[in-house]
Amino acid sequence: MRIGELSRQLGISERMLRYYEQEGLLAPARTESGYRDYDADTALVAKRIGMLRAAGLKLEAIRELLPCILDDQPVFDPCLEVRETLYKEAANLDRKLRDLQECRDIISGYLRSLDQHHRASSTA
DNA sequence: CTTCTAACA
DNA sequence: TGTTAGTA
């Protein structure tokens, strides 16, 4: 598929899709007219790059993981070199998870307050 | 109308 | 990153 459809499908801007390619993370084929043509595998890689980015990884870190990204069974040779990176990212995600949990608790508190106000005004 | 590259508010 | 120009 072409860049427009992939962009809408993944929720990643065309600009970023081209940027990932520019940074060497993606290598979509080209049609005779020069249009980028993403096959299923390339589209999957794009999707995972997007997820990894959403998780907070920098493109440099993602580039290291690239050999392991194209799916399921990890490629252990290159992956061994980035074991430390993965541990570090896992730790970062754990921290973000705690922050998100804290944020969720705060929002829950707001909702409880709203409920109380609602009951108070409708009962009165 | 969609995509491409390059560049800039 | 968004957006835009001028093409193909």
Image: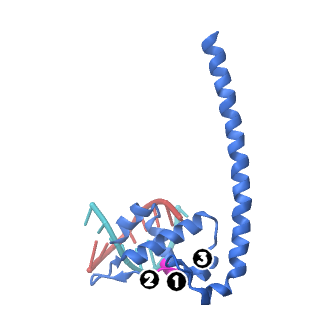
Chain colours: A blue, B cyan, C red
Q: Look at the image and say whether residue A23 sits in the magenta stretch.
A: yes
The residue that disc 3 covers is A62
Element marked by disc 2 = loop
Instruction: Please name the amino acid that badge 1 sits on.
Output: Gly
Instruction: Give the left or right position of residue A31, taking residue A89 as reference.
Output: left
Cα–Cα span, label 2 and label 1? 7 Å
Residue A116, picture quadrant: top right
Sequence order check, earlier mark of 3 and 1 = 1
Cα–Cα span, label 2 and label 3? 15 Å
Sequence order check, earlier mark of 2 and 3 = 2
Residue A23, picture quadrant: bottom right
Q: Residues at marks 2 and 1, common chain?
A: yes
| Image spot of residue A22 (x, y percent) | 50, 80
Q: Tag on residue A24?
A: 1
The residue that disc 2 covers is A27
Q: Is residue A4 above or below residue A39?
A: above
